[in-house]
Amino acid sequence: MLVRATFQAQLDELKEMIIELGRQAQFAVGESIDALKNQDVDKALKIIADDRQLNLMEEEINDKAILLIAQQSPVAIDLRRVIVAIKISSDLERIGDLAVDIAKSVIRIGPKDLVKPIVEIPRIAEVANKMVTDSLKAYKEEDTDLAKRVAKIDDEVDEAYGKLIKELLELMSQKPDYTQQITQLSFICRYVERVADHSTNISESILYLVKGKRYDLNA
């Protein structure tokens, strides 16, 4: 019983590490969107510099997960918990990378007057970041119903992304002097849409964890 209690404590610690990584990744995304709204190059540079910490956190999670497999030889759902920890940490680290990508686009846009007010991108980003929040909650509680609801929201993000890209392409033909800026804004839209995709990936991992089967929630 003592061995089992120790192993469970290690699994719980691994889960908390992942949730903290998720919080940091979410924060980075929020800061990158704030940098965009305010054309704050200094903040964008800080986001890029801080990304190393997220990378180190993912490495620590992976090392701990591999050590658990080596020491405990888990089976069935316990093995899935460790495997899913590695998978989810990868998705969260990639969300952090997307925040860096947004920050780099903010730097490329610079202080030049914007082709249009930055309204839609923050709205889409708020939905995508809420998906991350809910996917982490679903992971913590192993809640498959919540995981499925998160995945369904991805369709809303995809639709909003498609509409905004269409609008930006139309603006490009109307205001060719802003082509470089519009290109960067289009990239940012794509990065935000990818945050939602990674949240869906996390939801799929939760279903695999609980049910032992792989699901494609984007189908």
Image (tube, rainbow, N blue to C red):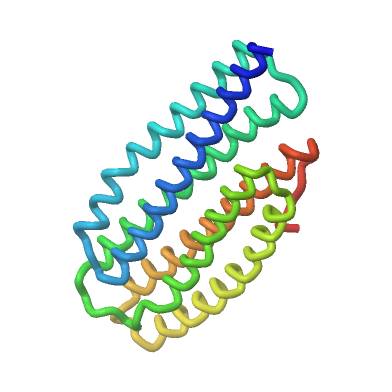
Q: Position of residue 159 (x, y in %)?
A: 61, 73
Q: Position of residue 162 (x, y in %)?
A: 57, 74
At x 59% / y 17%, what residue is drawn? Answer: 6
In the rendered view, tell whether residue 78 sits above or below residue 141.
above
| 181 vs 176, nearest the viewer | 181
At x 35% / y 83%, what residue is drawn? Answer: 116
Instruction: Say if residue 124 shows up in the picture.
Output: yes
Give the quarter of the figure containing the N terminus. Answer: top right
Residue 187 found in image quarter: bottom left
Q: Position of residue 57 (x, y in %)?
A: 41, 33
Q: Please identify the residue farthest to the bottom as the structure is shown.
A: 174
Q: Position of residue 5 (x, y in %)?
A: 63, 19
**Taking 24 as reference, is 160 left or right?**
right
In the rendered view, tell whether residue 28 sits above or below residue 86.
below
Instruction: Say if residue 93 shows up in the picture.
Output: no
Give the quarter of the figure containing the C terminus. Answer: bottom right
